[in-house]
């Protein structure tokens, strides 16, 4: 991961369009806030927080072993890049807060509320139970940074990644009202590749244009269903494009003729 020691006076440019942040070689530059952490007893030395960057991303914890990620095209591209940032940094975790407007949704098990996410490589030593102390420590110091995420690779899952997932699956846990995802670097990188690929396909998806949202696929067979307090079989990804919802609303409000 490349990190530019570029300090900024604010975070206004975080909301720039994703196409302007993607270099010709496919890398993406992202504005984050770096929070140093110490005394964790692990290799983790900082939390990279996305702040309001992912303003249309809502992650719902598993209901009947199925979790959901609802995000716009731009956010899927950014989130894919952030998974690759986490994959390439053995000393960093990536924190994705819930954006404003995250409301509970109905599910078979009752109400489900969007939760923030924390992403990290397994070898950072991050444990879900560490999160409350880390969260308190984030309030003490912060530095705006620009991180450069590696370019995405083809999304096809090679056999070696499949074997690694079988032997050492990713862990999906909920602790202190936060979803914590830890995995070996190659699994995090592949998930990032897959999210980038489905994000690139949103503009061509007819369901998104007609209905404002579309089911894009799911990640199955990557998470350990036994080793977490939130058993999960599938992580489903749904594209939700606010621009099409607004256009349909305006059309309904416009009088005929």
Image (cartoon, rainbow, N blue to C red):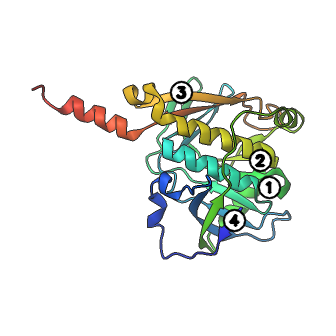
- Which one is in front in this view, the residue at disc 3 or the one at disc 1? 3
CA gap between label 4 and label 2 equals: 21 Å
Q: Nearer the viewer, residue 193 or 249?
A: 193
Describe the element under mark 4 as helix, strand or loop: strand
- From the image, tell me which residue sits under label 4: 2
- From the image, tell me which residue sits under label 1: 126
CA gap between label 4 and label 1 equals: 22 Å
- Which one is in front in this view, the residue at disc 4 or the one at disc 1? 4
The residue at the point 27 percent across, 33 percent down is 249
- From the image, tell me which residue sits under label 2: 182
Q: Image height check: is 152 above or below 33? A: above
Is there a contact, CB below 8 Å, between mark 3 and mark 1?
no
**Residue 251 percent coordinates (x, y):** 23, 31
Describe the element under mark 1 as helix, strand or loop: loop
Nearer the N terminus, badge 3 or badge 2?
2
| Numbered mark located on residue 215 in the image | 3
């Amino acid at each position: 991961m490349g990190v530019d020691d570029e300090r900024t006076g604010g975070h206004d440019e975080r909301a720039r369009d994703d196409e302007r942040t993607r270099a010709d070689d496919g890398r993406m530059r992202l504005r984050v806030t770096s929070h140093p952490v110490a005394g964790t007893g692990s290799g983790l030395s900082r939390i990279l927080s996305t702040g309001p960057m992912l303003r249309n991303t809502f992650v719902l914890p598993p209901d009947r072993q199925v979790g959901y990620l609802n995000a716009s095209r731009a956010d899927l591209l950014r989130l894919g890049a952030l998974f690759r940032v986490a994959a390439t940094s053995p000393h960093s975790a990536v924190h994705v807060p819930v954006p404003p407007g995250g409301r509970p949704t109905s599910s078979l098990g009752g109400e489900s509320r969007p939760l923030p996410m924390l992403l990290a490589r397994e070898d950072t030593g991050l444990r879900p139970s560490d999160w409350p102390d880390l969260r308190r420590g984030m309030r003490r110091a912060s530095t705006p940074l620009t991180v450069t995420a590696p370019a995405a690779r083809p999304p096809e899952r090679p056999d070696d990644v499949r074997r690694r997932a079988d032997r050492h699956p990713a862990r999906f846990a909920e602790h202190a009202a936060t979803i914590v995802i830890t995995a070996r670097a190659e699994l995090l990188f592949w998930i990032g590749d897959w999210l980038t690929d489905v994000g690139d396909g949103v503009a061509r998806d007819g369901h998104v244009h007609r209905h404002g949202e579309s089911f894009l696929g799911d990640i199955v067979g990557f998470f350990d269903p036994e080793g977490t307090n939130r058993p999960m079989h599938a992580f489903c990804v749904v594209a939700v494009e606010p621009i099409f919802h607004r256009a349909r609303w305006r059309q309904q409000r416009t009088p005929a003729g």
